[in-house]
Image: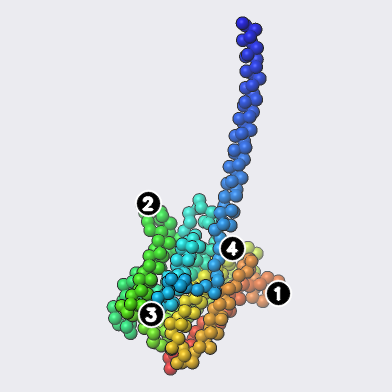
């Protein structure tokens, strides 16, 4: 009996190291897999999410066009829906989500919203009320207010409160609903959309001021950082202005249809097309890497300078149009 017991104990001792080694190998394999997954989590997540939707041929979905409504308003609502739902809003993603490491896409999206916020304000203040003296439209006022909301607010904004808050995309979706509600009332004859030359002039003036501010931002960044070996902010500035230019291009394109009679009466159709062409160039610039070389450099291009050129050209064309509208 003792011999059998000794024999069994001997076998158990031989098995224990094998079992321990196997367990260690398994744990090592799991740890390695976790490490690989962690290393791939951000780059793969960023690759899947990243997208700069700068299609200048983008059209309003047919279902969102109302007979008698404004095409520019429909375009604004459609762009909001596209960016916050179809393309996914990424500017407010927290650090533990891969898109938080992106910078070009969120800057492009926030550039779009900045232009739409300006347009919504002009709708409220100029186009959507009778000669600027009647009561402001509640839907337009709501949309303008929601679009002023910062684009980087997630479920929690610890700088203001520990309680959950309304996210940026929720605010923007509400703005889109308000714009559609206004447009539907407009189609039903229950809202105002002034299609007079003075309303168009005032709106274009505001757009031109906005573009001037963006060109000044480009100029300042070029003056302060041109030629730097590692300019990590150049692409942020570039894509913010690109998003703004893209949204303005689409909104102004549709405004040209809303105000087709005014443009025809003032013989501005050709000037309008040239202005849109310059904005389109600014919106379509898409370098693989944004470079901020010296403007006169032979080796390194200055994409910010090129963008600023087209933006100022579009602004000059807008000024030409508004001068004619003044007469």
Q: Is residue 237 visible?
A: no
Pointers 3 and 2 in contact (C-beta within 8 Å): no
- Comes first in the chain, label 2 or label 4: 2
- Secondary structure found at label 3: loop
The Cα atoms of the two marked residues, 3 and 2, are separated by 46 Å
Residue annotated with mark 4: 232
Give the x, y percent position of residue 27: 60, 34
Q: Is residue 97 placed above or below 223 in the rendered structure? A: above
The quadrant of the rendering that contains the C terminus is bottom left
Q: Nearer the viewer, mark 2 or mark 4?
A: 2
- Comes first in the chain, label 3 or label 2: 3
Residue annotated with mark 2: 162
Q: Nearer the viewer, mark 3 or mark 4?
A: 3
The Cα atoms of the two marked residues, 2 and 4, are separated by 32 Å
Residue annotated with mark 3: 68
Q: Is residue 142 placed above or below 28 in the rendered structure? A: below
The Cα atoms of the two marked residues, 2 and 1, are separated by 53 Å
**Residue drawn where x is 38% and y is 65% of the image:** 174
- Secondary structure found at label 2: loop
């Amino acid at each position: 009996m003792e011999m059998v017991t000794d024999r069994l104990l001997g076998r158990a001792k031989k098995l224990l190291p094998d079992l321990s080694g196997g367990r260690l190998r398994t744990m090592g394999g799991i740890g390695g897999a976790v490490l690989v997954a962690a290393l791939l989590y951000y780059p793969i997540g960023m690759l899947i999410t990243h997208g700069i939707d700068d299609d200048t041929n983008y059209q309003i979905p047919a279902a969102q066009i109302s007979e008698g409504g404004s095409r520019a308003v429909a375009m604004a609502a459609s762009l909001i829906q596209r960016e916050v739902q179809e393309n996914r809003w990424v500017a407010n993603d927290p650090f533990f989500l891969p898109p938080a490491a992106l910078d070009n896409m969120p800057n492009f999206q926030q550039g779009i919203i900045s232009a739409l916020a300006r347009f919504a304000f002009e709708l409220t203040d100029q186009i959507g009320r009778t000669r600027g003296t009647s009561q402001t439209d509640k839907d337009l006022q709501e949309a303008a207010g929601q679009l002023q909301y910062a684009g980087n607010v997630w479920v929690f904004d610890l700088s203001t409160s520990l309680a959950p808050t309304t996210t940026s995309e929720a605010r923007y979706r509400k703005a889109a609903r308000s714009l559609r509600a206004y447009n539907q009332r407009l189609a039903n004859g229950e809202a105002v959309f002034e299609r007079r030359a003075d309303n168009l002039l005032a709106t274009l003036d505001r757009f031109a001021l906005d573009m001037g501010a963006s060109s000044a931002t480009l100029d300042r960044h070029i003056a302060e950082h041109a030629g730097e070996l590692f300019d990590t902010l150049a692409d942020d500035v570039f894509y913010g202005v690109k998003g703004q230019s893209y949204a303005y291009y689409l909104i102004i394109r549709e405004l040209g249809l809303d105000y087709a009679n005014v443009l025809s009466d003032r013989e501005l159709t050709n000037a309008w097309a040239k202005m849109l062409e310059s904005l389109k160039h600014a919106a379509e610039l898409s370098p693989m890497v944004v470079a901020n070389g010296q403007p006169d450099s032979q080796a390194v291009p200055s994409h910010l300078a090129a963008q600023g050129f087209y933006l100022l050209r579009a602004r000059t064309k807008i000024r030409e149009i508004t001068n004619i509208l003044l007469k």
